[in-house]
Amino acid sequence: MKEGALIKKLNKLYPGVKATPMAEWDDTNDPGIWFKGSEDSMAVDGLPLYDCYEEFGYEINPDVEKILNDAGWMAEPYDAGTLMAYPN
């Protein structure tokens, strides 16, 4: 799935993830998604998008990770509070 379509789908399903093109993060044209809502504790149906401390038993919300994987993308932590996604 192309970046724009995936961003639209993610934001429609989970507005709290605040998915945006990677270009807003680093001014490149490389494909990628930056989740501005990475640190929001309620981003995905009342659960975090990304749990770097695995308080909820996962690192990347499994519902979002499945959407990404099904679309041919993968999530990758940038740091303890920032999640990115890249095409596989």
Image: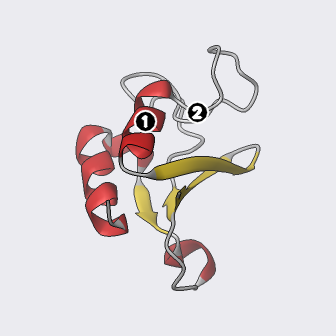
Please provide percent x and percent y for residue 59. Answer: 65, 29
In the rendered image, the quadrant that contains the N terminus is bottom left
Residue at position x 51%, y 53% in the image:
35
- Assess disc 1: are there few (<14), some (14-19) or many (≥20) residues with their C-alpha within 10 Å of its C-alpha: some
Q: Is residue 88 above or below residue 51?
A: below
Tell me, yes or no, if residue 43 can be seen here: no
Q: Is residue 47 above or below residue 69?
A: above
- Element on which disc 2 rests: loop
Question: Is 41 positioned to the left or the right of 58 in the image?
Answer: left
Please provide percent x and percent y for residue 53. Answer: 76, 25
- Assess disc 2: are there few (<14), some (14-19) or many (≥20) residues with their C-alpha within 10 Å of its C-alpha: many
Residue at position x 36%, y 49% in the image:
71
Question: Is 68 positioned to the left or the right of 39 in the image?
Answer: left
Q: Which residue is mark 1?
A: 64
Amino acid under disc 2: Ile
- Element on which disc 1 rests: helix
| Discs 1, 2 touching: Cβ within 8 Å | yes
Please provide percent x and percent y for residue 11. Answer: 30, 49
Please provide percent x and percent y for residue 87. Answer: 50, 61
Q: In which quadrant of the rendered view does residue 4 lie? A: bottom left
Amino acid under disc 1: Val
Question: Is 70 positioned to the left or the right of 76 in the image?
Answer: left
Q: Which residue is mark 2?
A: 60
Tell me, yes or no, if residue 27 can be seen here: yes
Q: Is residue 27 above or below residue 42?
A: below
